[in-house]
Amino acid sequence: MPLSEPIKILVTNQKGGVGKSTISANLAAYLAMQEDLQVALVDFDKQASPSRWTKKAPDIGIRVDQVEINYQSAGMALLSARAGVRKYSSGVQVSICDFTWTPAMSEDFMSDFDIVLVPSSSAKFEMASTEIFILEYVQKRMARLAVNKQSLIIVPSRVDPGYASKGTFTNLDFLTNCHIAPPIHRMPEIDSYVYEDFFCVCSDRAVSDNFCTFGKYITKMIDERQEIRKTLSINGPSVNREIGKKVSVLDDYRNRAKNLGFYGGAAMADPKQDINLSLPQDPPSVRSIGSRFIPGFLKKNQE
């Protein structure tokens, strides 16, 4: 991969305990050791877990930096986070940022990244929470996603070896930019690796093979992102006008959740009023799936 603008990867979720810091540190190690890439690890974690792991394990050339965000205001939070990413991502090929998502941070920050990894366990409630997290983000930033073609990747994390992702996260099936990565298995002896070594080169063959499978998948997505960058265009006003008028994906999700009486929290919140844009109408670029209107650039081929 030629040295140019780095591929920026955000590892995030609003929930803790899903393996976010573990994935960040070990993905950085995999890309540096197995793919021979220049990697920066930007740590927004208050506990600095990925930084400590990377610094205490054998030095493999990963550049590690910690960033403290100024939450004095929403604007300051976004500015300080962006400044940290920009400062510590220069001069590398891949930048991996570990960040626990908070409502105090603007979704514009997430939109800055090429790839967003969202770790999730296999528990039904956590899978539902992950779906809601992604749907809310997509609803708020559809216009930006139409332009930057960002990849959203769910990472099944700390799951049993027999886990199969088929039939999971079905409420996200219509999103062409949303994918499910190979799962990262639960490791009973994980404490023996923390701060000592990295999964991709550990002595346990099952652990190393499992994480290398995940690493190869992310490498493929990085290569694809490099190609996508060559085709990105800042044009597309007709698509963006339709997005502003027709987005009702999360509203449909909320309604079905209420009818089932299953989900709480964000799913039960009253949706915001649609924004009425007085712009000239172009021919519709959306398709109806059930009661949802799906923008053309997000729909998967349903034929």
Image (cartoon, rainbow, N blue to C red):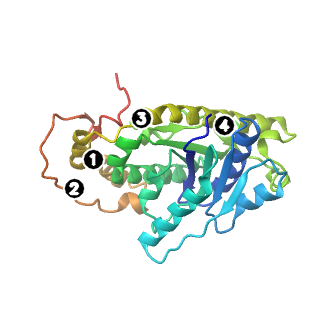
Query: For the residue carrying disc 3, how many other residues have a C-alpha within 10 Å: few (<14), some (14-19), or many (20+)?
Result: some
Q: Circle 2 sits on which residue?
A: 274
Mark 1 residue type: Val
Residue 240, by quadrant, is top left
Residue 275, by quadrant, is bottom left
Sooner in the amino-acid sequence: mark 2 or mark 3? 3
Residue name at image x 66 percent, y 51 percent: 40
C-beta proximity under 8 Å, tags 2 and 1 = yes
Above or below residue 107? Residue 168 is above
Quarter of the picture containing the C terminus is top left
Q: Circle 3 sits on which residue?
A: 176
Mark 4: secondary structure = helix
Q: CA distance from mark 3 to mark 4?
A: 20 Å
Mark 4 residue type: Phe
State the residue in front, 112 or 215. Answer: 112
Q: Circle 4 sits on which residue?
A: 214
Q: CA distance from mark 1 to mark 3?
A: 15 Å
Residue name at image x 54 percent, y 38 percent: 180
Above or below residue 62? Residue 149 is above
